[in-house]
Image (spheres, grey):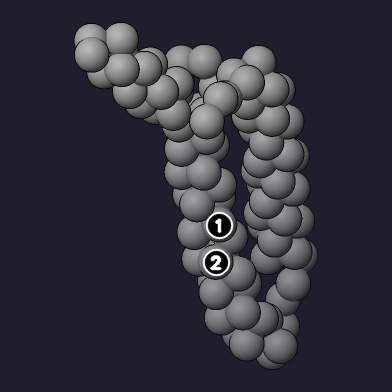
């Protein structure tokens, strides 16, 4: 099996851009949530607070997951990633024969 690590780098960069855009969207959702929480008042606000608390929890978990995904992409893919290290190590085993 031959890996084209230049292509892997390109795809890793594309994935990182996509994840960064997703993080931006999640932060925008949080900003909108905060604005709505400041403006919403009255009898209906109590039920709304519960929904917004759940949204915050879910959004925070989503942001954390996106961060983990970005870290995984960076550590596994590309010319400095684990796939490259493993490929090099396996190639060296064949050279030692």
Q: Is residue 22 above or below residue 96?
A: below
Q: Residue at x 63, y 26 (%)?
A: 8
| Mark 2 residue crowding within 10 angstroms, few (<14) / some (14–19) / many (20+) | few
52, 88: nearer the viewer: 88
Marks 1/2 in contact by CB < 8 Å: the verdict is: yes
Please state the horizontal and vertical placement of residue 20, each as a whole percent of the image: 67, 36
Q: Quadrant of residue 62?
A: bottom right
Please state the horizontal and vertical placement of residue 87, each as a whole percent of the image: 41, 23
Kindly identify which numbered label has been placed on residue 26. none
Instruction: Look at mark 1 in the image and give the residue it sits on.
Output: 62
Q: Is residue 40 left or right of residue 95?
A: right
Q: Residue at x 31, y 17 (%)?
A: 94
Q: Is residue 47 above or below residue 60?
A: below
Please state the horizontal and vertical placement of residue 66, each as a whole percent of the image: 55, 47
Q: Quadrant of residue 55?
A: bottom right
Tell me the quarter of the image containing the C terminus.
top left
Specify whether residue 38 is in view. no
Specify whether residue 51 is in view. yes
56, 20: nearer the viewer: 20
Quote the CA–CA distance across marks 1 and 2: 6 Å
Q: Tally the marks.
A: 2
Q: Is residue 59 above or below residue 63?
A: below
Tag 2 secondary structure = helix
Q: Residue at x 56, y 25 (%)?
A: 2
Instruction: Look at mark 2 in the image and give the residue it sits on.
Output: 58
Q: Is residue 83 left or right of residue 46?
A: left
4, 82: nearer the viewer: 4
| Mark 1 residue crowding within 10 angstroms, few (<14) / some (14–19) / many (20+) | some
Q: Is residue 71 above or below residue 30?
A: above
Tag 1 secondary structure = helix
Please state the horizontal and vertical placement of residue 26, each as a whole percent of the image: 68, 51
Instruction: Tell which residue pokes out farthest to the front in this image.
Output: 97
């Amino acid at each position: 099996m031959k890996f084209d690590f230049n292509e892997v780098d390109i795809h890793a960069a594309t994935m990182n851009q996509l994840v960064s855009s997703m993080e931006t969207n999640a932060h925008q959702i949080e900003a909108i949530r905060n604005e709505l929480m400041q403006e919403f008042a009255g009898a209906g606000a109590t039920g709304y607070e519960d929904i917004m608390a759940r949204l915050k929890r879910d959004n925070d978990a989503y942001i954390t997951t996106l961060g983990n995904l970005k870290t995984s992409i960076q550590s596994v893919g590309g010319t400095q990633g684990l796939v490259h290290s493993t490929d090099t190590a396996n190639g060296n085993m064949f050279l030692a024969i």
